[in-house]
Amino acid sequence: MTEVEFAVVGAGIAGLAAATTLRAAGREVLVLDAAPQAGGAARSEPIDGHLVERGPNTFRVSAAMNEFLRSHGFDAVLEPAAPGGGERFLVRGGALVPVPMSPLAFARSPLLTTGGKLRLLAEPFVRRGDPRGESVATFAKRRFGCETRDALIGPFLTGIYAGDETQLGVETVFPSLAAAELRSGSVVRGLLAQALRGGAAKGRPGTWSGKGGIGALAGALAAALGPALRLSAPVSRITCEDGVHRLAIAADSGDAEVRARGLVMAAPAAESATLLEGLDADAANALREIVYAPVASVSLSLATGSTREPVRGFGFLVPRGEGDVLLGCLFPSQLFPGRAPAGRELLTLLAGGMRRPDALDESDDRLVAALVGEIDRVLGLRDAPRTLAITRWRRAVPQPGVDHVRLVAALRDRIARQPRIALAGAHLDGVAFGEALASGVRAARTLLEDR
């Protein structure tokens, strides 16, 4: 039996951030995870001279993430994307069309008609509404018009959530836009007023990864924990007696028990639900309501210059109606050094999502053939690509619905009735890598403040 002040279940980025925060406060902590490696979905792997990301490929450094990395000495692990990574594309009529990144580019862009652009610019004059409980699709149509919803916002959500804008809730997906309308009656007026007030903490601009991949950043946090991190240690049951949490561990070396005064649940929603069932069945049921989109990540190697359309920029997204199983294609070797050997390009293809969840059931050969056919139509392949890795994530990206904000609030209210438990993870307040990290920090601070 092991006794510690705090136990953290889950060694993804949220759990690692929670444990790091607790340790920095001088507290004794133990992190437990069933997997043989830390980092959760953050997995970077060298394959045939390439550095392949099997999970997330890039992240934004939010203010909360920036503060965490600086205060704990991990900011040196960060690596910025090349300046050309700001160039992004959408598929329109089988061709790549640049996403407008400036007012002049927006004015010239063919992604919206003149009418669509005028409708978007008229947003400040649209009557105030109430975004609470609205889907992104309903909110976007009401504030910006159908064209902007379908041509820009829908594809953007494909890249972030692999989701369906008619099912995703705007309060979680675009919290700043929803808050701006509630505060000022207009998204534009609300955001402008916020910018003029200033004073808010800022993150780092641009797109980022870790030196050696995102997995290397997670690995740095894990290494700093040392023996406070225990892998291949699946928690099978959690009970609570006299304010002490008892965690049963079913490891290869035999069953064991960990006792802790405080507990951070940083496992994915389904795993957290199973473990919390005996403590609060209603909380467990709420966690089970959170849906995940399945995603397959396929990494390909191409000879440099072997495409009709040049491989440049961040990559491209495939709007609904422009493809079948392909959601988007990233160009990691254009973003970061060391992602591909000389004379090669690394492409990461994302497939499935809520649009085509059955794509993950295809055989490797059929899946790759379908994806190569789709990128051939867009890029024009002159040589056959080489397959490096295929990773299937059956539960890849949480899908916050229209009632997600209220579901999470009720969930936290119930958990607060339990002695010293806090929740963390991408399924709560945002799916981005930095948001998951920040959720771990918040969970740790919640326990530190609970005396």
Image (cartoon, grey):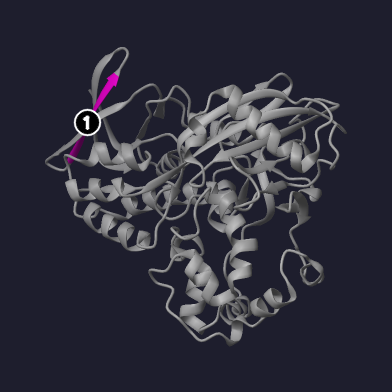
Q: Is residue 313 left or right of residue 129?
A: right
Q: Which x, y percent locates residue 115?
A: 70, 77
Residue lying farthest left? Answer: 242
Q: Is residue 87 visible?
A: no
Magenta residues? 244-250
**Left/right of residue 360 with respect to residue 284 in the rendered view:** right
Residue 233: x and y, percent?
Answer: 34, 23
Q: Which residue is mark 1?
A: 237
Magenta residue check for 247: yes
Q: Residue furthest top?
A: 253
Position of 238 with respect to 105 (left or right) is left
Q: Is residue 441 above or below residue 401?
A: above
Q: Is residue 231 above or below residue 217?
A: above
Nearer to the camera, 350 or 282: 350
Nearer to me, 164 or 251 = 164
Where is 67 relative to 134, above or below? above
Judging from the image, what secondary structure is the residue with disc 1 in? strand
